[in-house]
Amino acid sequence: MAKPDNREDNEEHLQEHIDHTIGNLHEAKDYLDEHADEITEEEKQSIEAKNERREESIQAFIEEKRDESKR
């Protein structure tokens, strides 16, 4: 039997996702700052592309959290 849909802690989980993704974003930026002259251009572009996707994810999580708070 399926579990009932419990949304009580959705906002909390979304905030955890936001915090985790922001942490990854900062960690990647710090890595680039420290190792930019030691990595290939391809690796640098890959990290920058991931960070762009992280920024998009953060915005999506924020919007979803706003939606959850209205329920």
Image: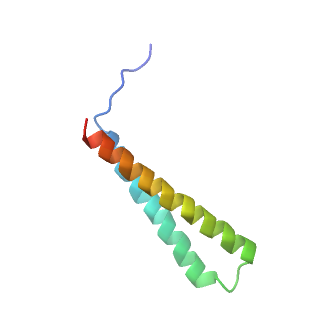
Residue 27 in picture, x, y percent from top left: 51, 70
* Outermost residue toward the bottom in this view: 37
| Residue at the spot 48% in from the left edge and 54% down from the top edge | 57
Residue 25 in picture, x, y percent from top left: 50, 66
Q: Where, quadrant-wise, is the C terminus in this rendering?
A: top left
Residue 12 in picture, x, y percent from top left: 31, 46
Q: Please indicate whether residue 23 sits to the left or right of residue 38 in the image.
A: left
Q: Nearer the viewer, residue 52 or 20?
A: 52
* Outermost residue toward the left in this view: 70
Q: Quadrant of residue 69?
A: top left
Q: Please indicate whether residue 46 sits to the left or right of residue 32 in the image.
A: right
Vertical side of 43 occupied by 5: above or below = above
| Residue at the spot 64% in from the left edge and 83% down from the top edge | 36
| Residue at the spot 63% in from the left edge and 82% down from the top edge | 35
Residue 40 in picture, x, y percent from top left: 74, 77
Vertical side of 21 occupied by 61: above or below = above
Colour style of the rendered protein structure: rainbow
| Residue at the spot 68% in from the left edge and 86% down from the top edge | 37
Q: Nearer the viewer, residue 64 or 16?
A: 64
Q: Where, quadrant-wise, is the N terminus in this rendering?
A: top left
Q: Please indicate whether residue 30 sits to the left or right of residue 16 in the image.
A: right
Vertical side of 23 occupied by 34: above or below = below
Q: How many numbered marks does the figure carry?
A: 0
